[in-house]
Amino acid sequence: QVQLVESGGGLVQAGGSLSVSCAASGSIGSISAMGWYRQAPGKQRELVATIGSGGSTDYADSVKGRFTISRDNAKNTVSLQMHSLKPEDTGVYYCTARIRRRLSANYNDYWGQGTQVTVSS
């Protein structure tokens, strides 16, 4: 089995900072891309940021310059540092990772359970 468990998030005032982290565990052979999505109430889930196994990153235009994604390949973790937060950043933040399980040749996408980030105005 493979699990992704998020931590962090919470409530912050506009202009503040928060971080969320995610740890992958279980029968992991290798991890390629990791990333964060978010879903605001009444809206579709949207991509926030991704990071490749080599460290290449990509961000949604709405968070560029404010959010930073990073990963620790030795610990199978991915983090998202969020600064200058806005009320529109409010939502449930989901971690995702493309993982190849041990003894498997294929990669599959796994998701965490989500963690709430609320930015008050």
Image: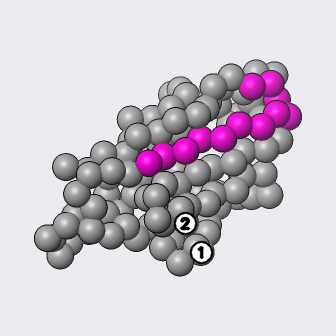
Secondary structure beneath dot 1 equals loop
Residues shaded magenta:
12-23
| Tag of residue 51 | 2
| Tag of residue 69 | none
Residue at the farthest left position = 103
**Residue bearing mark 1:** 56
- The kind of residue on which mark 2 rests is Ile
Give the image location of residue 66, x and y in percent.
Answer: 78, 51
Residue at the farthest front position = 74
Is 67 situated left or right of 52 in this image?
Answer: right
Crowd around label 2: few <14 · some 14–19 · many ≥20 (10 Å): many
Q: In the picture shown, does residue 83 fall above or below 8?
A: below
Say which quarter of the image contains residue 51.
bottom right
Crowd around label 1: few <14 · some 14–19 · many ≥20 (10 Å): few
Q: Quadrant of the C terminus?
A: top right
Confirm whether the magenta stretch covers residue 13.
yes
Residue 91 in sight: no
Secondary structure beneath dot 2 equals strand
**Total marks drawn?**
2
- The kind of residue on which mark 1 rests is Ser
